Structures are given as structure tokens and as C-alpha cells.
Amino acid sequence: MKILAIETSCDETAAAIVEDGRKVLANIIASQIDLHAKTGGVVPEVAAREHVLKMIPVLEECLSVAGCGWDDIDALAITRGPGLVSSLIIGTETANVISYVKGKPLIPVQHIVGHIYSNWLDVESEIEFPVLVLTVSGGHNELILMKGHHQFEILGETRDDAAGEAFDKVARILGLGYPGGPAISKIALEGDGSRFKLPRAFLEKGSLDFSFSGLKTAVLEVVRKATVPGDNSRNRIPNSQVVRNNRLDTVPGDNSQNENTKSQFLADLAASFQEAVVEVLAEKLMIAARKFPEVKELHLAGGVSANLRLREVIQQKLEKLSQGMTFRHPKSISYCTDNAAMIAAAGYYLYQLSPDKFRPNSNIIPTTSFEI
């Protein structure tokens, strides 16, 4: 069964064709990163206009790459939310029209569920249930116990800033640009992650929820207290020179030695921040794994699943756990970020559960709800 999916929850215009929920025939993504880098984040109205411009070319390229015509497509899948409503409208209306004109069943997919199913893409071996899933993206973190296809029990979720959002905001504070995750991961490779003692918000005992707003504030305080080399008061930089609009604007001194000091400061702070995020995410996953020893597999999904340090720490902790669980993350970096292939995979398994439920011209309406 071939499903063509459309994903427009934020700033990627994406279309994909996936066969039987696993085999990716085409996965086209038109990114708006360069456009939104100018403003340091996504502007909803700008994103929506870009979706309008990119939608038809992306669909045409998707069909061409897959070598398919509309007669080869068995059903459509569409992200219904959560996300930016103005962006979701472009995708859902496109899918509604195609479904009506082409007479194809239309399957609405929840965005986070799509991320969960990214681990089914291009996988040959059977995935064994129960599965414990950690989703880590810009707007959400969840720990989910998955007992079967589309059978979800939420164990923990975001209370304030999600990990991906924290990466973006800290990158902005450090003047590293947008998107923040890749920028921080890159500079952290040169840093000492133990230099700054940043907080780990494990919350109350036994909690599997997540909170990263305090960590973001702690990074901001470190930057505000930054000093230039030396020990006299003349060398301390006034706060107004260090941080403007919650962003590092000036550097300690203007000679090469001070430039090197500033570079090391940024690298160490980025590494320390990354370690604080990774430790909490990985440890919460291990707490859940110990709580549910019947789990067969641990899955990492979402944009932050591309973080190599996070993958490394989870693998290390899992080996110490010695419970024989399989660890999976998306096979391709393109499956970590927002993409339509994951929506097609989620749509396929949802369709298999109740094929009669999905009909052409369903008139899918977007939603901002996080309810699975």
C-alpha cells in the first residue's frame, strides 16, 4: 500500500510516499531555515506564505522521485496538529482538495505520533512491543509506553520549555544562530562539559515530566556574570555590554588572547548546557525502563534525536541497565526533523487498524491540541 503524506506543522513543506509503512520511495522537504534565521525563529505568517509557494512544486517532485502517478497512490495522510495553525491550514486544505478530486482515503495524523513512527522507516527487522518512546522536539517532550500500534500511554511530558526550545533559546543567548540544536552540538565538541555547574531539573521523586526553563535561565545568568581575563573590577564587563535582549552581543576584550578566551567560554558553556539536557533526558528514560522491565525496545524520536551526544549517553546507560532492550533512533537525520515520511508511516498503521474509517473528502480541520 502506497501512502502519500503531507506535513506542514511548522516551517518545512514536506511530502513523501511510503510503501507499507516502512519503505520510503520519496521524502521531499523544502526547508525555510535560511528565511527564519534572519529573525532568529519562525514567524508564522512568513512560514504560511512559503508553504503556499512551495506546496505544488514539492508534491510534483515527490511523485517524480517515487516514479508514481496519482493512480498509484492508495491513500493520503496529513498532519492535523499540533503546530502553527496558519501552516497547518495550508497542508490540510491541500490534502482535502486532493482527496476529493482524486477520490483517495484521507488519514489525519497527530504530529507527535508521526515522530514516534519515524523509527519504523527503512527498518527491515520487526519491532517488538511493548516499546518505550522518548520524543524530544522543539515544542514537546514525552515519555510514552507503546503497547501496540497506536496504543499509547503517556508517562511524562513537558511542563514548560521543551528540550529543543531550550537549545534554540540558549543558542540565541550565546549568539550562535538558528536553529540552535546543530549549532550548540557543533561548538560543544570543543568544550568542557564539566566547567559550568548547571542545574538538572529532575523534579519531584518519581516524576517522569520534563522542565528546562530553569536551565535556560541558569545559562543566561552565567553569561551575565561573564568577566574578561584578570581579577580587578576594571576587567568586569557591565551587564549591558554582555547581554542585550537576552543575547550575548559583545566579547571580552579585543585582542587575540581574549578572542580565544571568549571562544572557549562559549564552547564550554554550550557543552555544559548540552550535558545538563542530555543527562536529564537519558536518566528519565532509564527510570521508565526500570519501571517497565517488560519493555522490549527503547526508541528515541523527534528533532533532538539527531543529537549524537544524547544517543551516546542513552546507549551507555542502557548497557549498564542490562535488561536486554533494543535501542533505536531514526535511520536517517531527515527522519528526525519534521518530515512527511513519518506521517505516512503513522497513517499506514492507523489505516490498517480501521480501513473503513477513512474515506475521501473527510474535510480534516487542523488543531493545536497535543492530545494523542
Image (cartoon, rainbow, N blue to C red):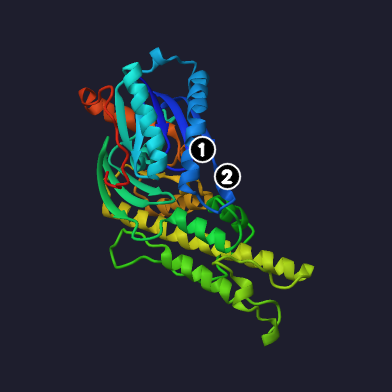
Q: Residue at x 49, y 42 (%)?
A: 47
Give the amino acid type for the residue marked by disc 2 in the picture.
Answer: Leu
Q: Is 341 located above or below residue 135 in the figure? A: above
Within 10 Å of the Cα at label 2, are there few (<14), some (14-19), or many (20+) other Cα atoms? some
Q: Residue at x 78, y 67 (%)?
A: 256
Determine which quarter of the picture holds residue 204: bottom left
Q: Nearer the viewer, residue 273 or 248?
A: 248
Q: Is 207 located above or below residue 294 in the figure? A: below
Q: Is residue 345 visible?
A: no
Secondary structure state at the residue bearing disc 2 = helix
Q: How many marks?
A: 2
Q: Is residue 84 visible?
A: yes
Left or right: residue 142 compared with residue 251: left
Quadrant in which the C terminus appears: top left
Give the amino acid type for the residue marked by disc 1 in the picture.
Answer: Glu
Query: Which residue is tagged 2?
Result: 35
| Percent of width and height locating residue 247 | 57, 65
Determine which quarter of the picture holds residue 258: bottom right
| Percent of width and height locating residue 83 | 38, 45
| Percent of width and height locating residue 58 | 50, 28
Left or right: residue 109 compared with residue 317: left
The extreme top residue here reads 71
Instruction: Kindly check if marks 2 and 1 are in contact, taking CB atoms under 8 A apart as contact.
Output: yes
Q: Nearer the viewer, residue 224 or 150?
A: 224
Q: Is 66 located above or below residue 199 in the figure? A: above
Query: Which residue is tagged 1?
Result: 50
Q: Residue at x 46, y 15 (%)?
A: 68
